[in-house]
Image: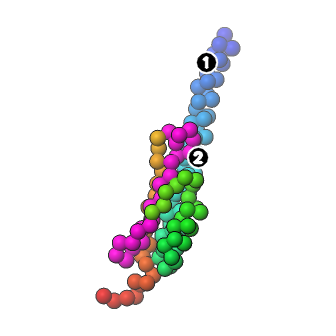
Amino acid sequence: MVTAEAATALPALVAFAAALVWALGAAAAQIQCVDAARAGARAAARSEPVARAEAVAREAAPDGAEVSLTRSGELWRVIVRAPAPGPGGLGLTLGAEAAALAEDTVGVEP
């Protein structure tokens, strides 16, 4: 009797453990996206070349992430998008956006 119960419960426990591991991996990748967006925005705000700011963001981003950097007015915006880890990412895209005020506009009166 115990063997039959264990045989039916074990696959459910394995699936639950796998889901927890995937969720932790996805959470870690989301945090990497946030960190990458912030790092890229800081680099752009310091008037680093656009290519360098994108490189800074890519270094901090998870593997396979897309980084876009744009300037609108006085703000630099960095958007980082990455597929969730795991088999095929399970169709989930992680992402983050950060903005920073360009230092070349600080203290400049219109």
Q: Position of residue 63 (x, y in %)?
A: 58, 53
Q: Depth-wise, is mark 2 or mark 1 nearer the camera? A: 2
Q: Position of residue 29 (x, y in %)?
A: 56, 52
Count the numbered circles shown: 2
Q: Identify the image's colour scheme: rainbow, by chain, secondary structure or one colour.
A: rainbow
- Kind of residue sitting beneath label 2: Gly
Name the image quarter holding residue 109. bottom left
- Kind of residue sitting beneath label 1: Thr
Q: Is residue 73 above or below residue 24?
A: below
Few, some or many residues within 10 Å of mark 2 (<14, 14–19, 20+): some
Which quarter of the rendering shows the C terminus? bottom left
Q: Position of residue 69 (x, y in %)?
A: 44, 67
Q: Residue 42: in sight, yes or no?
A: no
Tell me the residue at 52%/46% (across/down). Answer: 84
Which residue is more in the foreground, 27 or 85?
A: 85
Residue 98 horizontal side relative to residue 1, left or right: left
Task: State yes or no: residue 24 in magenta.
Answer: no
The residue positioned farthest toward the left in the image shown: 110
Tell me the residue at 53%/40% (across/down). Answer: 88
Q: What numbered label is drawn on residue 8?
A: 1
Q: Is residue 18 above or below residue 110?
A: above
Q: Position of residue 108 (x, y in %)?
A: 37, 88
In the image, the segment drawn in magenta is: 69-90
Residue that label 2 marks:
25
Tell me the residue at 39%/72% (across/down). Answer: 71
Q: What secondary structure is found at the residue carrying circle 2? A: helix
Residue 30 horizontal side relative to residue 76, left or right: right
Q: Earlier in the sequence, mark 2 or mark 1?
A: 1
Q: Residue 24: in sight, yes or no?
A: yes
The residue positioned farthest toward the front in the image shown: 51
